[in-house]
Amino acid sequence: MTRIALISLGLLGLVVACAEVSMPEPPEGRAIYDANCAQCHGASGEGGGPWAEGLSPAPADLTALSEDGAFPRARVLSVIDGYDRTGLPGQEMPEFGLLLEGETVPVDVGDGVLTPTPRPLAALLYYLESIQD
């Protein structure tokens, strides 16, 4: 087989695999949010959770993450998984290793390319995207 044929077969396999994956919905992400994030960011995502008192700076308002009407998926994923917290004051936000486990789902992080993302992390991303003002 030629290299192009092999690449085509690989891409076809990826498309078929993606078509069979059940994608997470915001309610799945809400459950993860309630268990991992609401303590600091509050039940509504606007901050003021029971653990937020005394934190400086205060936890971010997660309902106001969109920039010019676009939700910054890649940036949000990078902050949650601990990969990139550049520009965030302090190091109060923990890393969530359990969100990085399990099956992966294809997520478009804003560049049109589907990126394999752990399902719990994708579910949380979709929930946060759903609560933007």
Image: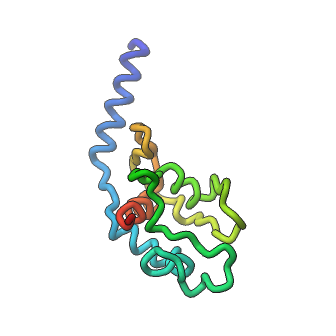
Q: Nearer the viewer, residue 99 or 73?
A: 73
Furthest residue toward right? 90
Describe residue 76's horizontal placement relative to residue 133 as left or right. Answer: right
* Quadrant of the image occupied by residue 119: bottom left
Name the colouring of the figure: rainbow
Total numbered badges shown on the rendered structure: 0
- Name the residue at 40% across, 48% down: 107
Describe residue 63's horizontal placement relative to residue 99 as left or right. Answer: left
For the N terminus, give its image quadrant.
top left
Image: 61 above or below 49:
above
Furthest residue toward front? 68
Q: Position of residue 52 (x, y in %)?
A: 60, 82
- Name the residue at 59% across, 64% down: 97
- Name the residue at 31% across, 51% down: 21
- Name the residue at 45% across, 78% down: 34
Describe residue 34's horizontal placement relative to residue 40 as left or right. Answer: left
Q: Nearer the viewer, residue 19 or 42?
A: 42
Describe residue 107's horizontal placement relative to residue 20 as left or right. Answer: right
* Quadrant of the image occupied by residue 5: top left
Furthest residue toward top? 2
Q: Position of residue 86 (x, y in %)?
A: 67, 53
Q: Position of residue 111 (x, y in %)?
A: 43, 38
For the C terminus, give its image quadrant.
bottom left
